[in-house]
Image (cartoon, grey):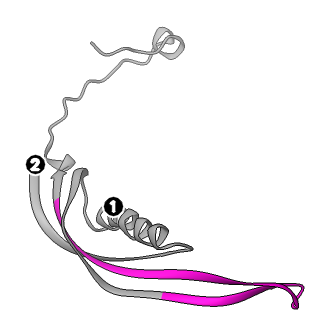
């Protein structure tokens, strides 16, 4: 029912600051794990983080093509993260089935299982 395993995940993040780019990359770990694995993820615990690629792109932004030039930066980071994943396999849980009869009382009030 409960499974614990280690996995290597590679994610990338983009932002207007270094912190935003790294935060975006770390936030993508959970999304990637949910796509890859069926079940309920209890915890994703990072064990090791390595920077694969880190880029800063600088460009000049102008108002109406000529006025008020200013330098802007955009950061991109690719991280490789070793994670410990705690997963519950929902398919392994046996649920008890009960059938509720169709009648007016159950339609109006709703049936509360005991």
Q: Residue at 13% of width from left, 47% of height from top?
A: 92
Q: Residues within 10 Å of mark 2 (few under 14, many from 20)?
A: few
Q: Residue at 45% of width from left, 88% of height from top?
A: 55
Q: Residue at 19% of width from left, 34% of height from top?
A: 95
Q: Could you say whether the residue bearing mark 2 is in a helix, strand or loop?
A: strand
- Is residue 1 depicted above or below 58 in this figure? above
Indicate the quadrant where residue 68 lies: bottom right
- Is residue 59 depicted above or below 113 in this figure? below
Q: CA distance from mark 1 to mark 2?
A: 18 Å
Q: Identify the residue position indicated by label 2 in the image.
A: 2
- Number of callouts in the render? 2
Q: Identify the residue position indicated by label 1 in the image.
A: 30
Q: Is residue 80 left or right of residue 67?
A: left
Quadrant housing the C terminus: top left
Label 1 vs 2, first from the N-terminus? 2
Q: Residues within 10 Å of mark 1 (few under 14, many from 20)?
A: some
Magenta region, residue range: 56-84
Residue 43 at x, y percent in the picture? 22, 51
Residue 10 at x, y percent in the picture? 29, 78
Q: Is residue 24 magenta?
A: no
- Is residue 64 depicted above or below 2 in this figure? below
Q: Residue at 88% of width from left, 91% of height from top?
A: 66
Q: Is residue 76 magenta?
A: yes
Q: Nearer the viewer, residue 76 or 82?
A: 76
Indicate the quadrant where residue 36 lies: bottom left
- Is residue 35 depicted above or below 41 in this figure? below
Q: Nearer the viewer, residue 65 or 26?
A: 65
Residue 94 at x, y percent in the picture? 14, 38
Main secondary structure found in the magenta portion: strand
């Amino acid at each position: 029912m409960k499974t614990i395993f280690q996995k290597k995940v590679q994610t990338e993040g983009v932002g207007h600051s270094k912190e935003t780019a790294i935060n975006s990359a770390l936030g993508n770990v959970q999304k990637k794990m949910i796509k890859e694995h069926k079940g309920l993820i209890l915890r994703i615990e990072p064990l090791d983080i390595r920077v694969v690629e880190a880029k800063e792109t600088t460009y000049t932004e102008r108002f109406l093509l000529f006025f008020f030039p200013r330098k802007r930066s955009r950061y991109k980071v690719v991280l490789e993260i070793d994670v410990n994943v705690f997963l519950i396999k929902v398919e392994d849980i046996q649920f008890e089935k009960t059938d509720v009869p169709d009648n007016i009382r159950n339609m109006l009030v709703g049936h509360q299982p005991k």
